[in-house]
């Protein structure tokens, strides 16, 4: 990743530390490290970890053989490579020193946390999520631009799929086609392409398999990939031949639920109120027991991150927050329908990252 102001992000992280009783922030695998430093650690058994003290310079402790991959960002952190025969836990413990309280990234492997706890018996560890989330949840204009490009690429694919032939193909074949379309139309890395046909559509995270799509099938396609590390995630519904009245009714309910959530989302509204807006429409239509997941999730460097659009989350939406709105109705043994778009909260509502048609695409 490039073009981001890592110095500003690191400064902000350290301001958060200064305002707290935490002495040091430790960040290993996952997206917090690339967010702060531009470097993504290999998720392997050799430890990579950034030690960010409240005072003093941040140090990136990295396996010697991976050190050449690190893009040095002068003034943001120094690099401390460790050799194959060195004890990396001892090195990190030395940098953490006498810290009473440490925050550690919540995707750090437990084996490393356990070893650090043993090496630092007087240091109390807690999750860094409140700190890193506070930074990452509000997207900068450059991040929103990448989300917009990722969404636009997915929209092109949604348009192509509406003209595509599905009948006679296995779900897994279509899934590969969707991934190829994404990468041929502006997405750097296609990350997932759920293709769930007929009764499989009632399983929201269905693994595309050998089922051959045929006449009369509804098809849920949920797909996304990244541009510059930032993701897209959109779901559209296709139907081989004319859909039944029941399918059209369910689709209309889901479409209305998604619209209700989108017009509800704006600064000052709690995340759970967006979920409630979608759920109310589905409940009023008699399908409440068939909407079996939250209404959405944040998106950025991770496809699923804060804020979660779910009952019980009183987190108040603010400009710059990016998240999905994806209500669905899943009728076991019959079919499923989900409509998903990414939106970014603005000063007075939301900006859609997806603009492709939300109508049922009747296909061959
Ligand atoms: Zn999902
Ligand atoms: Zn999705
Ligand atoms: Zn999603």
Image: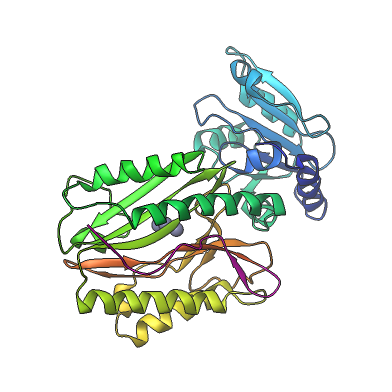
Find residue 159 and report its image quarter. bottom left
Instruction: Using residue 129 as the reference point, say whether residue 285 is left or right of it.
Output: left
Q: Quadrant of residue 282?
A: bottom left
Residue 261 in picture, x, y percent from top left = 50, 76
Measured as percent of width and height from the top left, residue 311 is found at 48, 74
Magenta segment boundaries in residue numbering: 346-364
Does residue 276 appear in this view?
no
Q: Main secondary structure of the magenta part?
A: loop
Q: Is residue 189 above or below residue 157?
A: above
Can you say whether 136 is above or below 237 in the image?
Answer: above
Which quadrant is home to the C terminus? Answer: bottom left
Residue with the most extreme front position = 163
Marks counted in the figure total: 0
Q: Is residue 350 magenta?
A: yes
Image coordinates for residue 308, horizontal then vertical, percent: 52, 64
Does 165 sit left or right of 320 as displayed? left
Q: Between 358 and 69, which is closer to the camera in this rendering?
A: 358
Q: Which corner quadrant of the figure contains ligand 1?
A: bottom left
- Quarter holding residue 191: top left
359 w.r.t. 122: above or below: below
Residue at image position (70%, 49%) is 142
The reply to whether residue 112 is visible in this rendering is yes
């Amino acid at each position: 990743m490039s073009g981001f102001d890592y110095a500003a992000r690191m400064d902000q992280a350290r301001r958060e530390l200064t305002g707290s009783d935490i002495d040091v922030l430790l960040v290993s695998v996952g997206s917090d490290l690339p967010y702060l430093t531009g470097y993504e650690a290999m998720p392997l058994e050799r430890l990579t970890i950034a030690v960010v003290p409240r005072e003093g310079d941040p140090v990136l402790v990295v396996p010697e053989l991976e050190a050449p991959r690190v893009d040095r960002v002068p003034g943001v952190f120094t690099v401390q490579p460790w050799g194959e025969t060195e004890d990396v836990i001892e090195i990190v413990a030395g940098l953490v020193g006498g810290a009473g309280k440490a925050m550690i990234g919540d995707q750090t492997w437990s084996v490393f946390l356990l070893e650090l706890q043993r090496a630092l018996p007087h240091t109390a560890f807690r999750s860094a999520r409140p700190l890193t989330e506070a930074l990452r949840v509000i997207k900068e204009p450059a991040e929103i631009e990448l989300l917009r490009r990722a969404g636009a690429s997915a929209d092109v694919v949604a348009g192509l799929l509406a003209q595509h032939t599905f009948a006679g193909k296995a779900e897994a074949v279509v899934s590969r086609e969707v991934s190829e379309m994404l990468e041929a139309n502006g997405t750097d890395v296609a990350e997932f392409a759920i293709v769930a046909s007929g009764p499989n559509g009632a399983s929201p995270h269905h693994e595309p398999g050998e089922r051959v799509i045929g006449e009369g099938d509804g098809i849920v396609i949920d797909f996304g990939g990244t541009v510059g590390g930032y993701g897209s995630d959109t779901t559209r519904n296709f139907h081989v031949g004319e859909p039944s009245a029941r399918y059209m009714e369910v689709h209309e309910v889901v479409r209305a639920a998604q619209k209700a959530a989108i017009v509800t989302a704006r600064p000052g509204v709690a995340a759970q109120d967006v979920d409630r807006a979608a759920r109310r429409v589905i409940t009023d239509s008699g399908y409440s027991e068939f909407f079996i997941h939250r209404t959405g999730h944040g998106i950025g460097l991770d496809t699923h991150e804060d804020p979660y659009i779910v009952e019980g989350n009183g987190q108040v939406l603010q400009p710059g927050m990016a998240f999905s709105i994806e209500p669905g109705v899943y009728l076991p043994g019959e079919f499923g329908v989900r409509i998903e778009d990414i939106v970014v909260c603005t000063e007075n509502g939301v900006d859609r990252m997806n603009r492709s048609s939300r109508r049922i695409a009747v296909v061959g």
